[in-house]
Amino acid sequence: MAAAIALAVQPALAQDATPRAGPPSQSTCDQPVVMVVTGLTLDRERMGEYARAIAESKIYEKLGGYYLNIPRTLEVFEGTQDPRATTITVRFPCIENARAFWYSRTYQETILPLRQDPSAGEYSVRVYPEAPLREDMVGKVGDNAFMADFPADRVPQIER
């Protein structure tokens, strides 16, 4: 059943993805992670172009990544915040897929340069393991699992 769901929900491969013969391989990618990007945005227009490029590339969809928040502060409960400060979180099925995004040819060669030279922002990018769902929350907020397979090899990589 899970394999049928995975096949049904996989997006079509884009031009930069490696074609596959037969059904996709089953992944052991089952420990979700959260990529956290924090910092100061120095050029909102260029960062808008950068965000559009990520969306148009469909790279998150290929790797099971999705935003967990909108990067606009709703309210500050403690301290002060520079109006240029931003935080965005992206959930991936596993660290391998977060790495596949970061080191993809599409990201490193096409998208990332949109916010560099000169820098459109001063950012820190970190990846954290997702915390396990507390037992008392099971069935109340979700299952902390991905129902589809998002193999990291769907996106061409740069040499590292």
Image: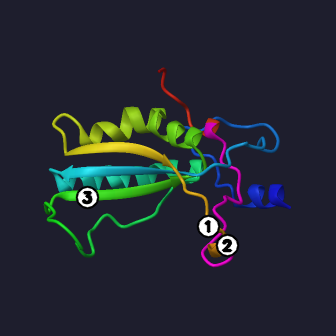
Q: In x, y percent, where is residue 147? A: 71, 60
Q: Amino acid at mark 1?
A: Arg
Q: Which residues are magenta?
A: 138-152
Q: In x, y percent, where is residue 128? A: 47, 47
**Marker disc for residue 30:** none
Q: Is residue 148 located in the magenta-colored stretch of the structure?
A: yes
Q: Which residue is mark 3?
A: 86
Q: Which residue is mark 2?
A: 138
* Residue at left offset 61%, top offset 67%: 134
In this view, the mark in front (3 or 2): 2
Q: Which residue is mark 1?
A: 134
Relative to 131, is 70 above or below?
Answer: below
Q: SS class of the residue under badge 3?
A: strand
Task: Say few, some or many: other residues with alpha carbon within 10 Å of mark 2 (under 14 / 14 to 19 / 20 or more).
Answer: few
Judge from the rendering whether residue 132 lies leftward or rightward of residue 83; answer left or right.
Answer: right
Nearer-the-camera pick, 55 or 133: 133
Relative to 44, is 106 above or below?
Answer: above
* Residue at left offset 67%, top offset 72%: 138
* Residue at left offset 48%, top offset 26%: 158
Q: SS class of the residue under badge 1?
A: loop
In this view, the mark in front (1 or 3): 1
Q: Given contact means CB atoms under 8 Å apart, are the residues at marks 2 and 1 in contact?
A: yes
Q: Given contact means CB atoms under 8 Å apart, are the residues at marks 1 and 3 in contact?
A: no
